Image (tube, grey):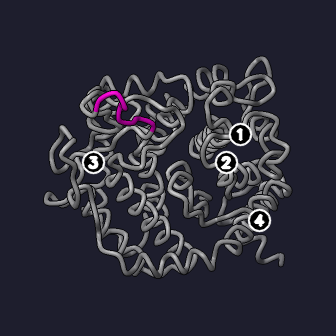
Amino acid sequence: MRLLSVLVCVLIGCSSQEKLSTAMSRTAFEAEVAATLRKQVMEEAAWAMQQEPLTVTAQGSPRSAGGKHDFFSEGDYWWPNPASVDSPYVQRDGMTNPDNFVAHRLAMIRFSRIVGALASAYKLTGDEKYVQQALKHCKAWFVDEATLMNPSLLYAQAIKGRFTGRGIGIIDTIQLMEVVEGLRTMLHAKSMNANDLAAIKNWFDQYLNWLTTHKYGKDEMNAENNHGTCWVMQVACFARFTDNQKLMAFCSDRYKNVLLPNQMATDGSFPRELKRTKPFGYSIFNLDAMTTICQILSAKEADLWNYQTADGKSIKKGIEFLYPYLANKNKWPFAKDVMYWDAWPVAQPSLVFGASAYGNKDWLNTWKKLDHNPTIEEVIRNLPVRHPLIWLQ
């Protein structure tokens, strides 16, 4: 045991017994998460090994104003106007129109699931076959000229008769975060091709430039609800992948000085989300996004987990507010969601990330008991972190 302690200390560069104890406890935590997920990961990876790439070029819509390589989606809560078939669509907030075009979003979710599963399996086994398969899909999306997606989102969340695309459509690419985290997990694998990796990073460099300079990106950045949170979450994730320290610092600053003080109440709730027609689902979603930001950006010089505003707002308070209802949603004191009330909660990343950050066993145990493999489309699209093992690096 003493030899093991010395070896761990050498590997992590610790200079004190306290650092060694912390590193070993994190190792134990990750082992517990791995044990919980192992069977599901290996089954999903076996499925992923059989899948061929499917990008935005595989299917299109005559309602898209873009081209073959442009991502296209339509606003979920917009419906035909019963007054006239040819009229612009009208909004029914919280009510998803099943006839809208979402094929590109589903393809991206599939892509995310494939890479997330393969990277998780690689982390568990070290088998290079998972890296090779993941790269095949990444090259199709980001490198190969015949099948790649353009690094912009000009035509996302369109509304028939109103908009060919909107800034809020940027939320659709939260599905690319686990692709990026999967690549980071496999970064030093023998099968990781340096040229392919450079080309993929170049794609994300271009996308980050679009996200931070185009009007749609700026609009989304300034959104005062979960959309603004998800802009920061994505930019932080992609910036870390491309080693863009300037953007990472910008995102950290925005979390501390914009998101947390303006979106959270002093009791830890998110008032703007509570006013929605799906207050439970949106509160969960926004908390997940904020904790993911903390997971991505926290470091010694910028520890977001332990940051709090002058009036006491913190991510810990946010988890503490929502946790009783994640453990037992029958205690929820607000209105029920107009759709998918029965679908929430699932194994929310806020619980496992929070448990890791604060050593909270209750949060971890609750996370372990919840559904780790949701099948409802609404839940999946609002759960970009589905493979938490690759995030614990």
Disc 4, SS: helix
Quadrant in which residue 193 is drawn: bottom left
Of tags 2 and 4, the one toward the viewer is 2
The residue range painted magenta reads: 77-84
The kind of secondary structure element at disc 2 is helix
In three-dimensional space, the C-alpha distance between marks 3 and 4, rounded to whole angstroms, equals: 40 Å
Taking 332 as reference, is 25 above or below it?
A: below
Expressed as whole percent of the image width and height from the top left, the position of residue 268 reads: 77, 30
**Disc 3 residue type (three-letter):** Asn
Is the residue under label 2 in contact with that under label 1 (CB below 8 Å)? yes
- Amino acid residing under circle 2: Trp
In the drawing, what numbered circle is on residue 336?
1
Q: CA distance from mark 1 to mark 4?
A: 22 Å
| Image side of residue 92 versus residue 266, left or right | left
Q: Which mark is residue 369?
A: 4
Q: Which residue is mark 3?
A: 202
- Left-right relation of 87 to 268: left
The tag earlier along the polypeptide, 1 or 2, is: 1
Q: Earlier in the sequence, mark 1 or mark 4?
A: 1
Which one is in front, 305 or 156? 156
